[in-house]
Amino acid sequence: MCGINGIIFKDQKVNVKKILEMNELISHRGPDQSGYIRHENLLLGHTRLSILDTSKKGSQPMSSDGRYWIVYNGEVYNYLEIKEELINKNYKFYSNTDTEVVLNAYAEWGEKCFEKFNGEWALAILDKKENSLIISRDGIGYKPCYVFENNEFFAFSSEIKPLFCLYESLKFDPSNLGIASESLFYSSKTVFENINQLTQGRLININLNSNEKKLIRWDYPLSKLPKISPSYRENTENYYDLLYKSTKLRLRSDVNIGTSL
């Protein structure tokens, strides 16, 4: 578990103090390291919990070429297979993190890279050359991503409370009070005005020059439905095979792993 933050300042001077405050409020998500980057009117912040490559090479915000920068919370479990594919395309790697694999995968395949990932994430990638930002969330919605917007800011965070650093008088949305949290999750709403969740399986593409935003659906679960055999025995074998392989993938870690059943 890590934490991501970001702020686009629309009509006012960039205030670095705000991203530092946001990082501090989610320091419990990433106690190992925190950092930020500024690009024009954009600030990106990150707090890190080291799981893969615990060295400083895994620090974020991360870039391997100076053009693309990422803040990332999550894990892509098939990162070694994707890394090998990218190495065959002459990409070089400077760390053993899945973060760098995600970054280079985006450089190679753009938004199509998310279709290759087996994992869970909330992330933002800055393209300095195109002056654009994308914010993406995994297809199930395991990793949280809250989005806030008013006339002064567009911002996102792994939790709601850092957004109070931007606008201290956040108001409750009366129409959402009393609604079960599960219902709010699936409708991508919150109990606060101007704060929504980025819907699972979606990304936001932002042109930082014009502030134009596009909400794009990248995940289509119905296209991934498994084949079900009329044979109970075959289905049982397939289920065991899927469970075994998915568990094995999730054991990739550079720190101790624990399970709770």
Image: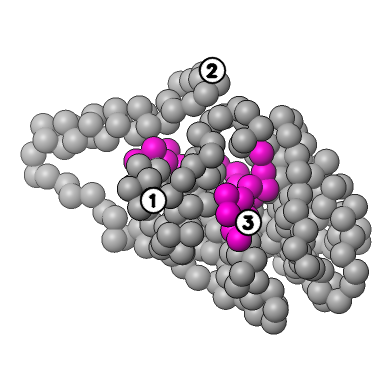
Q: Nearer the viewer, mark 2 or mark 3?
A: 3
Residue 3 appears in view: no
In the picture, measured across the screen, residue 229 lies left or right of residue 71, that is left
Position of 2 relative to 112 (above/below): above
Nearer-N-terminus badge (1/2): 1
In the picture, measured across the screen, residue 94 lies left or right of residue 47, that is left
Residue at (35%, 42%) from the top-left corner? 84
Where residue 256 is drawn, which disc sits there?
A: 2
Q: CA distance from mark 1 to mark 3?
A: 17 Å
Q: Position of residue 71 (x, y in %)?
A: 64, 50
Q: Which residue is mark 1?
A: 90
Q: Nearer the viewer, residue 4 or 83?
A: 83
Query: Of the residues shown, which amino acid type is indicated by label 3?
Result: Gly
Residue lying farthest left?
231
Query: Of the residues shown, which amino acid type is indicated by label 2?
Result: Asn
Task: Determine the image quadrant of residue 126.
Answer: bottom right
Where residue 128 is drawn, which disc sits there?
A: none
Magenta span of residues: 59-81
Nearer-N-terminus badge (1/3): 3
For the residue labelled by badge 2, is the local secondary structure a helix, a strand or a loop? loop
Q: Report crowding for label 1: few under 14, some 14 to 19, many 20 or more residues within 10 A (C-alpha).
A: few
Residue at (57%, 49%) from the top-left corner? 64
Where residue 66 is drawn, which disc sits there?
A: 3
Residue at (86%, 76%) from the top-left corner? 11
Nearer-N-terminus badge (2/3): 3
